[in-house]
Amino acid sequence: MDNYYETGWWNYPAKRSVGTDPFERIERMASASAVVMFSMSTCCMCHALKRLFCGMGVNPTVYEVDEDPRGNELERALKRLSGGASAVPLVFIGGKLVGAMDSVMASHISGTLVPLLKDAGALWL
């Protein structure tokens, strides 16, 4: 099974080409900072989440998918990760997929977002 892999947070078995797998790229990007958001520069929901995080004192790393040379690949992979819903916004905290706007807002309203951010090192208060 040298050409296949079945581990990782996405449980996505696929042929592997070194450096070209969008799921590996997303995993690397999502693990690089405490809070990572995949966005589109013209998306109003993405803007709302950016404002939420900034208002909380969190500085997320934001990847604008529409400005990436391989954005189409990323968008397809993000859509698959989201379960077929919209590809953006998609948020990772501490390298783990939190979800789209609805999941982040539900966590915020229920009071579970702040502990996630603290555990990831994105908030100190």
Image (cartoon, rainbow, N blue to C red):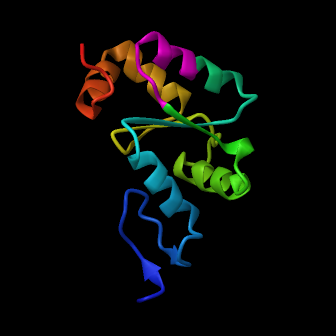
Q: Position of residue 4 (x, y in %)?
A: 46, 81
Residue 123 percent coordinates (x, y): 30, 21
Please check the rendered image and state whether residue 57 is part of the magenta-colored stretch, yes or no.
yes
Residue at left 58%, top 62%? 22
Q: Is residue 82 above or below residue 4?
A: above
The residue located at (47%, 73%) in the rendering is 13
Task: Give above or below for 120 relative to 50.
Answer: below
Kindly identify the residue that appears in the image at 41 percent across and 63 percent down. 11
Position of residue 117 measured from the top left corner of the image (x, y, whole percent): 32, 26
Front-most of 93 and 102?
93
Per the rendered image, the range of residues in magenta is 49-60
Q: Count of labels shown?
A: 0
Q: Hey, which residue is sitting farthest bottom in the picture?
A: 1
What is the x, y in percent for residue 84? 61, 48
Residue 95, image quadrant = top left
Q: Which corner quadrant holds the N terminus?
A: bottom left
Residue 65 lies in quadrant: top right
Choose between 52 and 105: the one closer to the eye.
52
Considering the image in quadrants, where does the C terminus appear?
top left
| Residue at 68 percent of width and 59 percent of height | 73
Left or right of residue 13: residue 62? right
The verdict on residue 62 being magenta is: no
Name, please, the residue furthest toward the top: 55
